[in-house]
Image (cartoon, rainbow, N blue to C red):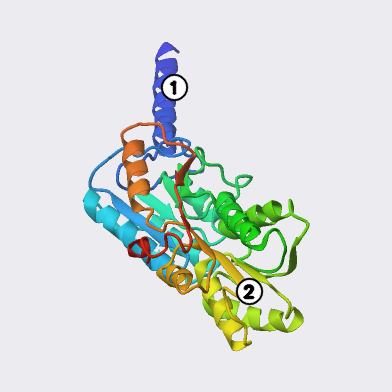
Amino acid sequence: MRRNRSLFTLMLSILLGGIFLVGCGGNTGSGTSTGSVTSCGNPPILSKSTGLKIGFSQNISNSPWRLAENKSMQDGAKAAGDTFVMTDAGGQDAKQVSDIQSLISQQVNVLIIAPLTESGEVSAILAAKKACIPVFLVDRDADHSLAKPGQDYVTFVGSDFVKQAQLVADAMIQATNGKAKIIELEGTSGATPAILRKQGFDNEIKKYPGMQIVASQDANFDRDTARQKMQTLLQAHPDVTAVYAANDEEAQGAIAALKAAGKVPGKDVLVGSIDGETAGLESIIAGQQLVSVTSNPRLGPLTYQAISDYAHGKKVANWIVMQDKVYTKANAQANLVNGF
């Protein structure tokens, strides 16, 4: 009887030990785990600090901002001696989810994701967590009710989008003495910067009754989309005196539409935007644009420092804030070298 009990105890220990090992897939370079439960940390630990295989999921590469971000991420991996694998979703949530799944299957050690929208890539972020791969979000965040920083992913590296928009609003308020009829060109629906830049701008100008938004439309952070939307909006609102664009690409589209309509940008209609692109700085220098608040795309140094800190067991903040600047006629020429 005692022998049977001992044998039973031994078999039970082996079984439980096997279950434990299956549950703890960890991150040892394979980036995978098996079973329905993972115990590799919340968020997953990064058990190696050198020779990493980095997967970067970009949502779209359709502008100077995105191209500068891509280069920054690639340069960061090179400087760290890491292998770099990049995908481009072409502006489609479903494609980006598929891209991330592909990177997971390639057994990357770390995933850097620039999500297209706040909710569209959440399933893939959680899939990476289940596979014991730590995720770092850049330039756009996820919906915190669906995926939590410091738990489902390590951190978000990006700008203070609300503050950016407030700074544009303040410049417009000062330039117009608090009186303007504004067309607002929003960013991609559902994207973090689009949501927060609208919130920041709208809330700031509400303090001044003379600042009126006469129309607001999504221009998808895209130059030609903004040009087309602006052409239509000008027909309905020919008395517009200011344009707030969610990024410099949209501002360039708006400026083109204003010129086509016979208006003088910077004189008949003030234009303000965000990003700090070379085209935006040149428009400020030429007097066609009032202001551009930077949204620095060179997020590589901050991101790779966060990865290194995390790999060495250091505490990483839930939000690593990129510091931005305000470009106006007074400093645009001097900062042209910082454009992209």
Q: Which of 338 and 139 is in front in this view?
A: 338
Q: Mark 2 points at which residue?
A: 269
Image quadrant where residue 144 sits = top right
Q: Nearer the viewer, residue 132 or 295?
A: 295
Which residue is rendered at x = 48% and y = 61% of the image? 328
- The C terminus - image quarter: bottom left
Residue 104 in the figure: left or right of residue 184: left
Q: Is mark 2 on a helix, strand or loop?
A: loop
Q: Position of residue 191 (x, y in %)?
A: 58, 60
Find out whether the residues at labels 1 and 2 contact each other: C-beta distance under 8 Å. Answer: no
Amino acid type assigned to the residue bearing label 2 in the image: Val
Q: Is mark 1 on a helix, strand or loop?
A: helix
Q: Name the residue under label 1.
A: 8
Q: Position of residue 133 (x, y in %)?
A: 40, 46
Q: Nearer the viewer, mark 1 or mark 2?
A: 2
State whether residue 84 is above or below residue 278.
above
Q: Where is residue 235 in the image (x, y as percent from the top left)?
A: 73, 84
Separation of marks 1 and 2 at Cα, in angstroms:
83 Å
Q: Which of 212 and 159 is in front in this view?
A: 212
Report crowding for label 1: few under 14, some 14 to 19, many 20 or more residues within 10 A (C-alpha): few
State whether residue 103 is above or below residue 89.
above
Q: Where is residue 95 in the image (x, y as percent from the top left)?
A: 50, 68
Q: Is residue 299 at all visible to an observer of this figure?
A: yes
